[in-house]
Amino acid sequence: MATKDPTAVERANLLNMAKLSIKGLIESALSFGRTLDSDYPPLQQFFVVMEHCLKHGLKVRKSFLSYNKTIWGPLELVEKLYPEAEEIGASVRDLPGLKTPLGRARAWLRLALMQKKMADYLRCLIIQRDLLSEFYEYHALMMEEEGAVIVGLLVGLNVIDANLCVKGEDLDSQVGVIDFSMYLKNEEDIGNKERNVQIAAILDQKNYVEELNRQLNSTVSSLHSRVDSLEKSNTKLIEELAIAKNNIIKLQEENHQLRSENKLILMKTQQHLEVTKVDVETELQTYKHSRQGLDEMYNEARRQLRDESQLRQDVENELAVQVSMKHEIELAMKLLEKDIHEKQDTLIGLRQQLEEVKAINIEMYQKLQGSEDGLKEKNEIIALLEEKTSKITAAMRQLEQRLQQAEKAQMDTEDEDKKCLQECQSKFDSLQKQISQKEKQLVQLETDLKIEKEWRQTLQEDLQKEKDTLSHLRNETQQIISLKKEFLNLQDENQQLKKIYHEQEQALQELGNKLSESKLKIEDIKEANKALQGLVWLKDKEATHCKLCEKEFSLSKRKHHCRNCGEIFCNACSDNELPLPSSPKPVRVCDSCHALLIQRCSSNLP
């Protein structure tokens, strides 16, 4: 038979010991269910095995005093290759109780395990084989494939939580001896362990079902309370809806009332316009009657003047009277000119006011076109009056010329003077008549303008009232629209609440069915496992978040126990099923346990 290489046999033995120690440490830690401390035996044996693995094939360095063979040199290299390892190196150097490099290496391994980065640090070290060749021989475990396999196995240690006190331990003087009795098992021990595992699984299932039942009861009570609160809120919403409907009906009635009032106001304004038209017509008729009476008075005065002129005998008195009349006529003409200018200014202002009134009447009421015709006739009358005033001025000039001629011819003939006096008196009478007519016309125009101003003011007041009513109606319509929107929103909320109520009723029915099934299972399990009530899984009340994804549990995100490690996970993180030694049938397992079990199966295969 061919002899095997002793170094290869050593490497294989160390690899198998590493597998057994890592596997035993993970299984015992998961069954232990707490954080590990430095006194835990499997953990101590793991560090001893790792120390032997790192020491395999280590080169001996000569110094002045003695030979130096320690693993602190390659571990110190990790700081250069992995920057995050600087904290571990600094903390190891700062520890006061460590005096030897071997003690520092042991402290480094413990700190790396607590950080859950031992596999990452050693992987960086194995990749750099050029640097490792300074510390290890070519046939060393860290230089061969077995070192990579051990680093892969170390990834499973990230599941373990360890709390190790490095300061108080005497790491320099510890003796690293492997205890093989921990890894040698009898058939009876194996059978007892399998039975214990099965019993623990049954108790865990029982506790899980009890906790699930409690949780379902609490959810049912909470759902009942929610249903009550929803019913109360629904009744409140129905009452508010009825109030809103009543408010809408009231607003509609007020809107109808305001519309009827608006129609009444329009009718009153039309009636008022008709009354004003009738008043204007009556005033015109009274003006015509008064004009006829004044004409008769004028005729009587003219007759009296003719009688008095015939009675005059003395020519000198008549001449003096003629001279005085001339001066009076001049003064009267000046006064008339001033009055005419003033009246022209007033007429211009009145025209502007009339134009403004026309513009307002055209914009607001197209029915008042008849009044515009009347204003046009008045403007024509004013134009005629202006023409007559121009004629009067021309006639006055002619009279002045004739008076001059009469003064020259006074000495010539008395008959001619008498004729001139008669002509002047007749013209003066006609001028006085025209002036009186113009004054009457101006008085009439002033009265018409006053009436139109009053009518305009009343129209403006009515328009302002209508605008106020329109603004009030718009505000009320906006309020009605907002109330409609609120009513629609309330309807949507009511529908949503009804949907939620139906969904919760369905959930309650499903939960009731599940409760009935779970109660039957609990009764079966209680009868079989009354004596085994000491072992308990992780309680549902203690777990509020998933251990892997760290998401919070809710009604949609349910809790599930892992049948291997006993922790609580969500459905997404525990949707795997594998057969365990405790149960031949496939059961629910978390993702981490699934990966570890598959890895173990692959490592056990030849």
Image (cartoon, rainbow, N blue to C red):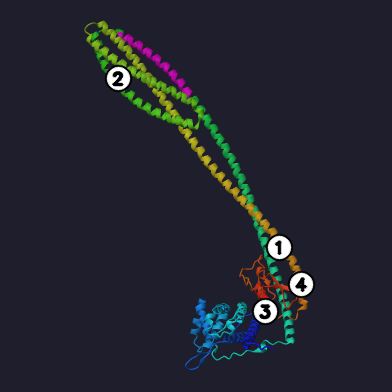
User: Pointer 3: residues within 10 angstroms few (<14), some, or many (20+)?
Assistant: few
Residue found farthest to the bottom: 65
Which three-letter amino acid code belongs to the residue tagged 4? Lys
Q: Secondary structure at mark 4?
A: helix
Provide residue 591's location: percent of width, then percent of height. 65, 72
Q: Which mark is residue 603?
A: 3
Q: Secondary structure at mark 3?
A: helix
Q: What residue sits right under mark 2 in the picture?
A: 333
Towards the viewer: 592 or 555? 592
Which three-letter amino acid code belongs to the residue tagged 3? Ser
Q: What residue sits right under mark 1 in the picture?
A: 507
The mark tally for this picture is 4
Q: Secondary structure at mark 1?
A: helix
Provide residue 58's location: percent of width, then percent of height. 55, 87
> Which segment is the magenta one?
280-309
Compare marks 4 and 3 and give the one earlier in the sequence.
Answer: 4
- The alpha-carbon separation of the residues under discs 2 and 4 comes to 133 Å
